[in-house]
Amino acid sequence: MKEFRSSPGFIQVKRRPGVVTAPSASNWDALPAVAAAGLSVLAILVGAQLREKALEVLGGGAFNAFILSKLTELEKPYKPYPLLTNRHVETIFAAFFRSLPSLTYRRECLRMADGGTVALDWPQPEIQDPKAVLILLPGLTGGSDDTYVQHLTRRASKQGWQVVVFNSRGCADSPVTTPQFYSASFTEDLRQVVKHTAFLFPSKRVYAAGWSLGANILVRYLGQEAERCPLSGAVSLCNPFDLVVADEDFHIGFNNVYDKSLANGLRKIFAKHAHLFEDIGGDYNIHLVANATTVRDFDDGLTKVSFGYKTVDEYYFASSSSRSIKDVKVPLLCIQALTDPIAPERGIPRADIEANPNCLLVVTPYGGHLGWISGDEAPFGCPWTDPLIMQYLDALEEVGLDHPDFRKAQEQDGDVELAGFSSRRATEKPGLME
């Protein structure tokens, strides 16, 4: 049975006083010149016209029908914020002007079996008796400093969830202790983080949510684990799904701005740890990596070699999470934006999502990439997605409490060892896709 619900119309936008602060004009100085010019022109072009469009909600099965009845956020129509309806305007505005909660974290570094290190950031103060545990996976080069991560962290914490942000190797100043970073194909670090988190909270269910590349890694992990997956549910946001399609669009028109910005972020991470790659030999092209102007350059010189692929296209095809949807056996909410310039709408595996009774898809008519500037806190507050994410996770947890046999993470620590603790203050500065 297919459940489909669309919500035409607009949300009444209200801005809560004291929640967010307007950016200063100096923030514009951080924009690349081409991005600033493009943003100004696009804002003028889309100015006063807001076209009414519907949410797309797609999913099958009795379980999704039950969960949909709990998601009252989807009964509200989606209204983009005035002047911020263009995909690039929304993406850039969110990257530079979204408010920063400025959280404090306790950092826990884990040493993996291969000698690599990841950093888990636990927001302070920690919840003494949490409702459940939520692991967050940021996007490419992202981490616990990012505004969209901090907003969901704050909301989930206020609602009684213990949150932990999984910073991949090299991200958010996570240590790099071997000549290997992470990739869209690599799920072993997440596998160990899930086991470790479940070990720390043996009486609680564990869930996960990921954005962009983090979402791709998460969905691949869910498919690989299938019936064995220890998570009780997951949320995927602005997932590129088909990396071959995403790469094709990445080199078209204004998307080159994002490509160069992400490549710049990757180069910065590499530069901090370039000494690990000295005289590495093999098929690595370290000169190309150090001077990469596109993400594809970086993947060609380093990523494909590190993870055993012959070509970048082979790496993108094999790493696409669209190939994993059919194998997902736990509840999964996928939230995409029709206007996402980095996760193209044509890459969404609609047929496989509809055929899998565990999967639910929501596509918003606007949103850009990591944008979703709509809802009560627009334009500077949390994304439109945050209340929906928590409503979905609370619904899953309610089902779990009603049914003791509902999936709960395995209580084993996995192949990790504690490498150290520290305290850190989030230090994110406005920037595009970093």
Image (cartoon, rainbow, N blue to C red):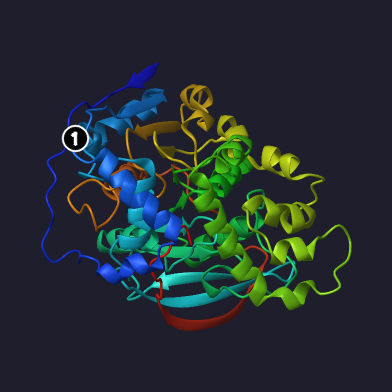
Q: Nearer the viewer, residue 390 or 244?
A: 244
Return the x and y of residue 49 as percentages of the image width and height: 20, 34
Q: Residue at x 22, y 28 (%)?
A: 52
Q: Which residue is mark 1?
A: 76
Looking at the image, residue 103 sits to the left or right of residue 377; the answer is right
Against 363, residue 184 (above or below) is below
Task: Provide the secondary structure element on which disc 1 rests.
Answer: loop
Q: Nearer the viewer, residue 40 or 303?
A: 40
Return the x and y of residue 378 as percentages of the image width and height: 21, 52
Q: Residue at x 49, y 56 (%)?
A: 137
Q: Quadrant of the N terminus?
A: top left
Q: Nearer the viewer, residue 371 or 363?
A: 371
Q: Is residue 117 visible?
A: no
Looking at the image, residue 71 sits to the left or right of residue 211; the answer is left
Please, which residue is most extreme toward the top here?
A: 1
Return the x and y of residue 213 as percentages of the image width and height: 54, 50
Q: How many marks?
A: 1
Q: Which amino acid, mark 1?
A: Lys
Looking at the image, residue 384 sits to the left or right of residue 423; the answer is left
Q: Quadrant of residue 288?
A: bottom right
- Callout 1: few (<14), some (14-19), or many (20+) C-alpha neighbours within 10 Å? some
Against 116, residue 140 (above or below) is above
Return the x and y of residue 346 as percentages of the image width and height: 50, 28
Q: Is residue 196 visible?
A: yes
Q: Residue at x 28, y 48 (%)?
A: 373
Looking at the image, residue 295 sits to the left or right of residue 391; the answer is right
Q: Nearer the viewer, residue 395 or 52?
A: 52
Against 175, residue 191 (above or below) is above
